[in-house]
Image (spheres, helix red, strand yellow):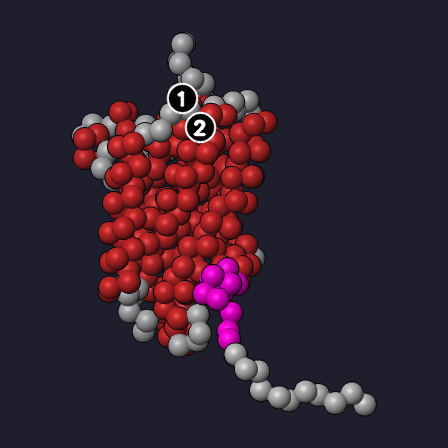
């Protein structure tokens, strides 16, 4: 028989924070992708919205971009809203209710690592959403401006951070039942009149809507994927919202 070497290591160490965050992100992603309700909100509903806009030709103009070119960036923004706000908000709210969060926060992952893991999970889900929604849009005739793909990726990452922060802020400060109601209500409001799917200029009072994170994400993606340009104002607004919501989540999140 081979003897086991039971000599203590000279420099014991654990995994790095990055590897822990990625492992937690993979776990959260598996949970999301096997949850029928999460798939409905994250992929199926945005896909139905994309199909509906394409069929109706709502944004068609004589000389401007086609409906599918205008709608696809907005639907991608809606998918970020879905996975960050609704998906993580509801899941975290009920994890908090059953004591799962309090337990995980005491592990080597730590509170900050747990929150970052949830952001990673949203980004992993977002990759699937972009592949599915983008693939369907291409079949419908979508022709994105290739010069803006990198800019669009930047806005998607920033949007994921911002709306995950909003979802976690709600989940960590109110009861799970209220989290369910608030996140779904915000998803409907921001998706319908928050400048996500429909350009802000289409609404009265657009000056106020323009400063919402939903409008900033929608405007940023439309500028990138339609014109191939970088919307600096939208980037600053979305960044400020991301910072505010992240700080608020860290400061007021309740683990029980």
Callout 1: 10 Å neighbours few (<14), some, many (20+)?
some
Residue shown at 32% from the left, 61% from the top: 171
Residue shown at 31% from the left, 53% from the top: 166
Extreme-front residue of the structure: 10
User: Is 2 positioned to the left or the right of 235 in the image?
Assistant: right
Task: Give the residues in magenta.
Answer: 13-23
Residue 84 covered by magenta stretch: no
Expressed as whole percent of the image width and height from the top left, the position of residue 224 reads 40, 28
Expressed as whole percent of the image width and height from the top left, the position of residue 119 reads 42, 55
- 252 in relation to 77, above or below: below
Indicate the quadrant where residue 138 lies: top right
Residue shown at 50% from the left, 31% from the top: 51
Mark 2 secondary-structure assignment: helix
Looking at this view, is 123 or 195 the one in front?
123
Expressed as whole percent of the image width and height from the top left, the position of residue 108 reads 44, 74
- Mark 2 in CB contact with mark 1 (< 8 angstroms): yes
Q: CA distance from mark 2 to mark 1?
A: 7 Å
Q: Which residue position is annotated with label 1? A: 227
Looking at this view, is 97 or 154 the one in front?
154
Find residue 148 and name its label.
2
- 46 in relation to 141, above or below: below
């Amino acid at each position: 028989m081979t003897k086991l070497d039971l000599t203590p290591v000279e420099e014991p160490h654990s995994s790095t924070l990055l590897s822990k965050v990625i492992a937690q992100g993979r776990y959260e992603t598996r949970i999301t992708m096997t949850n029928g309700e999460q798939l409905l909100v994250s992929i199926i509903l945005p896909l139905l919205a994309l199909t509906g806009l394409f069929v109706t030709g709502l944004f068609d103009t004589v000389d401007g971009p086609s409906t599918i070119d205008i709608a696809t960036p907005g639907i991608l923004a809606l998918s970020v809203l879905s996975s960050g706000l609704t998906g993580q908000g509801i899941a975290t709210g009920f994890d908090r209710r059953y004591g799962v969060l309090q337990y995980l926060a005491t592990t080597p992952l730590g509170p900050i690592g747990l929150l970052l893991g949830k952001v990673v999970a949203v980004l992993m889900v977002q990759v699937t959403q972009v592949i599915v929604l983008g693939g369907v849009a291409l079949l419908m005739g979508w022709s994105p401006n290739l010069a803006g793909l990198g800019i669009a990726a930047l806005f998607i990452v920033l949007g994921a951070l911002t709306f995950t922060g909003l979802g976690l802020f709600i989940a960590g400060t109110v009861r799970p039942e209220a989290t369910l109601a608030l996140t779904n209500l915000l998803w409907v409001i921001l998706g319908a009149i928050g400048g996500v799917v429909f350009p802000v200029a289409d609404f009265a009072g657009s000056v106020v809507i323009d400063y919402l994170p939903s409008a900033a994400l929608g405007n940023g993606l439309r500028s990138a994927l339609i014109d191939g340009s970088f919307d600096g104002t939208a980037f600053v607004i979305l960044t400020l919202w991301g910072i505010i919501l992240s700080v608020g989540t860290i400061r007021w999140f309740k683990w029980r």
